[in-house]
Image (cartoon, rainbow, N blue to C red):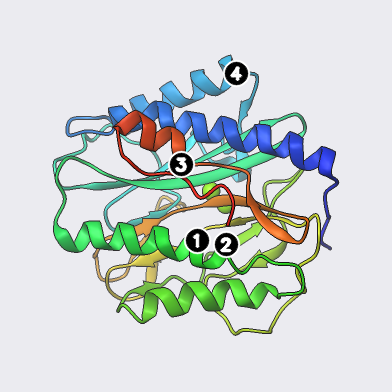
C-alpha cells in the first residue's frame, strides 16, 4: 500500500534527503586515485551522526556499513573495502540517512581521476536517464511511464538496463510501495498522485543488462564484467509536479563543476 505524504512530512523528508546530499558532497573531493572506500565509509558515518542523523543502511537487512560502494563492474550493494581506488576507475556511492523519522536515500557514480571516454559517456547517459524518469513523475501519469522513459533513453544508446533491482517508495521505511522499475511500458502501473515520494535509481550497464551476485550475498555485478553506473534521487509530487528533494549540487560545488541541479523540472 502506498503511503502518501503530507506537505509537512515531505519537508521533513527533504531534510533527510539533503543530509545524504551533503554527505555525498563531503566525500566527492576524496574520491581520487589512492582513496580507500572503507575510510570514506567511516567519514560518512561520522558526518551523518554529527548532523543529527543515523546511517540508513548500517544494519539494514544485516548490511555491515553506512555506504554501499560499488566500483567499476559492481552495480550496487558493494561492501566498502580496503582496496585503493585507481585512476580510470568509477565508484558508485549509495547513501542512506534516517532522520526526523524519515529516510533519505540517494546515489552518485564518481569518476576516479581520468576515465575512458566510453565510461564518462556511461555516467552522463545514466544521469540523464534519471532526469528523463523524473520528468514523468506528474500527477495522472503512471509508474510505468518512469521506467519506460529510462529504458527508452538508455537502450536507444546501446546500454543495458538492470531489471532485478528497482527504485521504490520512500518514507518511514527505506523501501515502501510502489516498486519503481527502470524499464516498463507507458500507461502501466499505479497512477501517480499528490504526496507520492519515491526514490528513482537507474542502474545502467555498458554491456549486457544481466547481473550476478558475489558469494558475499550482497555485491551485485555485471555478468560480462563491464562497467555499471547508478544515479538516484528522492522525488516528491508537489502541486502535481515532481520536486527533487535531494540534490547533486553539493557534489558539483565540491568538485568545482559548472553544473546546476535541476531543482525544478
Ligand atoms: Mg540508494
Ligand atoms: Mg534506493
Q: Earlier in the sequence, mark 3 or mark 1?
A: 1
Q: Between marks 3 and 2, how big is the CA–CA gap?
A: 14 Å
Task: Please name the residue that numbered disc 2 is placed on.
Answer: 134
Direction from residue 232 to residue 159 in the image, left or right: left
Task: Please name the residue that numbered disc 1 is placed on.
Answer: 131
Q: Earlier in the sequence, mark 3 or mark 4?
A: 4
Q: Nearer the viewer, residue 246 or 173?
A: 246
Q: Between marks 1 and 2, how big is the CA–CA gap?
A: 5 Å
Q: Nearer the viewer, residue 8 or 147?
A: 8
Tally of marks = 4
Q: Residue at x 48, y 29 (%)?
A: 23
Task: Please name the residue that numbered disc 3 is placed on.
Answer: 248
Vertical order, 52 against 65 (above or below):
above
Q: Between marks 3 and 4, how big is the CA–CA gap?
A: 18 Å
Instruction: Give the structural element (helix, strand or loop) at label 1.
Output: helix
Task: Please name the residue that numbered disc 4 is placed on.
Answer: 51
Label 4 vs label 2, nearer the camera = 2
The answer to whether mark 1 and mark 2 are in CB contact below 8 A is yes
Amino acid at each position: 500500500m502506498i503511503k502518501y505524504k503530507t506537505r509537512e512530512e515531505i519537508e521533513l523528508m527533504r531534510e533527510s534527503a539533503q543530509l545524504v546530499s551533503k554527505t555525498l558532497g563531503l566525500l566527492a573531493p576524496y574520491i581520487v586515485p589512492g582513496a580507500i572506500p572503507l575510510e570514506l565509509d567511516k567519514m560518512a558515518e561520522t558526518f551523518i551522526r554529527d548532523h543529527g542523523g543515523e546511517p540508513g543502511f548500517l544494519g539494514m537487512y544485516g548490511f555491515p556499513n553506512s555506504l554501499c560502494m560499488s566500483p567499476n563492474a559492481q552495480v550496487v550493494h558493494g561492501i566498502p573495502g580496503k582496496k585503493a581506488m585507481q585512476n580510470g576507475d568509477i565508484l558508485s556511492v549509495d547513501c542512506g540517512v534516517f532522520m526526523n523519522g524519515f529516510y533519505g536515500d540517494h546515489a552518485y557514480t564518481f569518476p576516479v581521476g581520468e576515465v575512458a571516454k566510453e565510461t564518462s559517456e556511461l555516467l552522463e547517459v545514466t544521469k540523464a536517464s534519471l532526469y528523463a524518469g523524473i520528468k514523468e513523475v506528474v500527477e495522472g501519469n503512471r509508474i510505468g511511464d518512469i521506467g519506460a522513459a529510462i529504458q527508452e533513453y538508455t537502450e536507444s544508446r546501446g546500454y543495458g538496463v538492470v531489471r532485478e533491482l528497482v527504485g521504490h517508495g520512500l518514507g518511514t521505511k527505506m523501501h515502501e510501495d510502489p516498486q519503481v522499475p527502470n524499464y516498463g511500458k507507458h500507461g502501466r502501473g499505479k497512477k501517480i498522485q499528490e504526496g507520492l515520494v519515491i526514490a528513482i535509481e537507474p542502474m545502467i550497464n555498458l554491456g549486457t543488462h544481466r547481473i550476478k551476485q558475489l558469494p558475499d550475498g550482497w555485491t551485485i555485478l555485471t555478468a560480462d564484467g563491464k562497467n555499471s553506473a547508478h544515479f538516484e534521487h528522492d522525488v516528491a509530487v508537489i502541486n502535481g509536479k515532481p520536486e527533487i528533494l535531494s540534490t547533486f549540487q553539493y557534489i558539483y560545488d565540491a568538485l568545482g563543476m559548472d553544473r546546476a541541479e535541476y531543482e525544478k523540472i
